Image: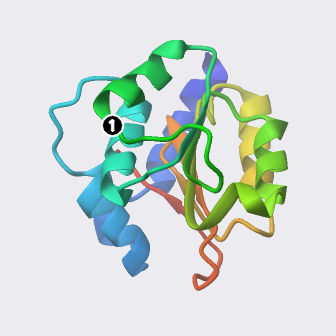
Amino acid sequence: MFYRIITYIKFLFTSTNQYGIHSPFIYDFVTKCLYKKSDFKGTKTIRTLVKSISHYKAKSVHIVSRNRHVQNLVKSTFTHIDFNHKPYDISYFEWPNMEISTLIMKAESYHNNSMILIKNIHQNQENSNLWELLKDNEKVTVSIDMFHCGVLFFRKEQTKEHFRIRI
């Protein structure tokens, strides 16, 4: 618990909102997706997942969660979603783990505009270390740390950047 508090205080001092972003792609994602008003109730991470599916008009989603509620929620909210078709438009992981690294290495699992959303990236020291390894992967070009969750993108046309955004 103490680790999480200290990490959150550091995050607050180093994070920004849409006004500190100079990448058009990330600015668009933050303003038109993350900061968009929504009637959907849920945790910040689940709201981010639902808004992202809607924003990117995702057709193929990969969900790795012990909680079946997340997949059922996505199924009921977006009836057109396919959960078994690669490449995935959006992948959701409840915890940072090495399976994400394996997914990143398999080129058939994602495409240029794919997004990986990871919950609990700062839950403990181990998760924070895994998050750092994932965002430093050579195939990841853009990462966004939102404290409660993190996002990885693979856009080849984008220079490698890391953002800390308050949501």
Q: Quadrant of residue 25?
A: bottom left
Q: Who's the residue at 37% across and 41% down the image?
A: 80
Q: Position of residue 78 (x, y in %)?
A: 33, 37
Q: Helix, strand, or loop for circle 1?
A: loop
Q: Position of residue 100 (x, y in %)?
A: 75, 43
Q: Quadrant of residue 46?
A: top left
Q: Who's the residue at 55% across and 26% down the image?
A: 5
Which amino acid is tagged 1?
A: Phe
In this view, 80 is above or below 22: above
110, 79: nearer the viewer: 79
| The C terminus lies in quadrant | top left
27, 110: nearer the viewer: 110
| The N terminus lies in quadrant | top right
Q: Who's the residue at 63% across and 66% down the image?
A: 111
Residue 136 visible in the picture: no
Decide if residue 52 is on the left or right side of residue 10: left
Decide if residue 165 is on the left or right side of residue 77: right
Q: How is the image coloured?
A: rainbow
**Disc 1 crowd, CA 10 A, few/some/many (<14, 14-19, 20+):** some
Residue 160 visible in the picture: yes
Q: Position of residue 59 (x, y in %)?
A: 44, 51
Q: Who's the residue at 52% across and 45% down the image?
A: 11
Q: Which residue in the protein does label 1 denote? A: 78
Q: Quadrant of residue 156?
A: bottom right
In this view, 49 is above or below 95: below
Q: How many marks?
A: 1
Q: Position of residue 119 (x, y in %)?
A: 57, 33
106, 35: nearer the viewer: 106
67, 30: nearer the viewer: 67
